[in-house]
Image: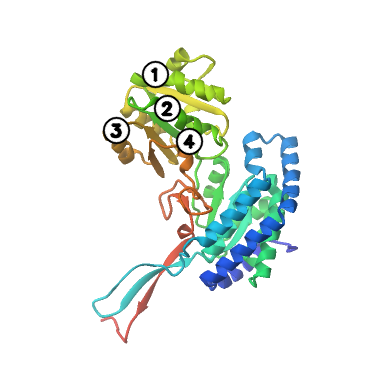
Amino acid sequence: MTDQTPQVRLERAKEASRATAALTSGDKERVLEEIALGLERDAERIIAANALDIARGNENGIGDSLIDRLRLDDKRVAALAAAVRQVAALPDPVGRVVGGHRMPNGVALEQIRVPFGVVGAIYEARPNVTVDIAALALRSGNAAVLRGGSAARESNTVLVEVMREALVRSGVTAEAIQTVDDFGRDGATALMHGRGYIDVLVPRGSAGLIETVVTESTVPVIETGAGNVHIVLDESAPDDWARDIVVNAKVQRPSVCNAVETVLVHRQAAPRLVPLVASALQSEGVAIHGDDMVAGLVSNVIPATEEDWATEYLSLDIAIKVVDDLDEALAHIRRYSTGHTESIITTDTRNAERFLAEVDSAVVMVNTSTRFTDGGEFGFGAEVGISTQKLHARGPMGLAELTSTKWLARGSGQTRG
């Protein structure tokens, strides 16, 4: 890919999108299988490139959470290939009938799903997103233009090469997958200002990156927000559920957006639950930022500040606050939540149903870990991202969220009077 301007690549992606839109479901399955085989075959090459990114990241001190997201090993490359196959096995949304009816004059109307055209993505230090977005874009009949950031430059370069080679082997134009990484910020700007070429743009990354894309773009954006995620431990929360769910939601993979960041504990349950949950967290190396009551129940607590309640740590840190009742917990969530995922641990059916009804987040849970907010876990295969906005898509986004609709009208000579 030796083009001298990002504009050329956007133009080529637009042209390629007409070809991908015409692919049959079977064609797209074969392309994705070829991509999965290429990832497996070139795993050593991919991991070697990733090692260069990891080394540079460590030198630049980008932080443990980004290093974790950046890292590719044999297991993660195999998981990428498996995710591509899962996407290939999903029902093709293109052509699916959404609705329709016959007008009084006899004209038959039908609304069907169609590809967007060109899907752009801007993200950072997440080479898995390079594969996920490309696979989802192709399965839904779109072309993709990717900007993966400097931290994953070597990894993304090889991943795009592997996928473009697979396209050629499948008889599909390689221009259906583009990267503008080598243009740096100019590439990102081209995506954000690519009106007429980019049909939808998806940012994934830090709150700052997402805010920049939403603010500066002249093309439609699906906002994938930060995850200041809450778990409420209600008065009736069982000990083992409270402990196991909070530890899982924080520790299993702390660097991702569905990891819990704040735990709100009902005052009547605090003496029972706070020491139990805090001890389990601290044994896993989690630093606890707590209010005065938490500090009185647990040792080695960092005094929580206003900033802690609004922080997405993405690390082995967690904020714990004691609240008087469910009303206060709901008020806290309304004030500080980013609208991603919230969960309540309770055996009180009334409180559970109230929580589900009143919390205004993309995913609202009862008695389960927030780590399940994920396209793969929801059965979508790979995911585009987790949308925290309310227009077009909300929550984990899969194939259907990369399509629009159009209306087909079939008449027999009718005219409007």
Q: Is residue 50 left or right of residue 316?
A: right
Q: Is residue 400 left or right of residue 102?
A: right
For marks 1 and 4, the one nearer the N-term is 4
**Residue farthest along the left direction in this orientation:** 104
Q: Can you give x and y, in whole percent of width and height, for residue 19 in the image? A: 58, 72
Q: Secondary structure at mark 3?
A: helix
Q: Can you give x and y, in whole percent of width and height, for residue 371 in the image? A: 49, 39
Residue flagged by tag 3: what amino acid is it? Answer: Asn
**Residue farthest along the front direction in this orientation:** 240
For marks 2 and 4, the one nearer the N-term is 4
Task: State yes or no: discs 1 and 3 in contact (Cβ < 8 Å).
Answer: no
Identify the residue position indicated by label 1 in the image: 272
Foreground of the two, 181 or 237: 237
**Residue farthest along the bottom direction in this orientation:** 413
Residue flagged by tag 4: what amino acid is it? Answer: Asn
Identify the residue position indicated by label 4 in the image: 228
Identify the residue position indicated by label 2 in the image: 240
Residue flagged by tag 2: what amino acid is it? Answer: Asp
Task: State yes or no: discs 2 and 1 in contact (Cβ < 8 Å).
Answer: no
Foreground of the two, 212 or 247: 247
Q: CA distance from mark 2 to mark 3?
A: 19 Å
Q: Is residue 28 visible?
A: yes
Q: Can you give x and y, in whole percent of width and height, for residue 49 in the image? A: 74, 49
Report the quarter where the C terminus lies: bottom left
Report the quarter where the N terminus lies: bottom right
Q: Secondary structure at mark 2?
A: helix
Task: State yes or no: discs 2 and 3 in contact (Cβ < 8 Å).
Answer: no
Q: Name the residue: 62% across, 36% down.
A: 65
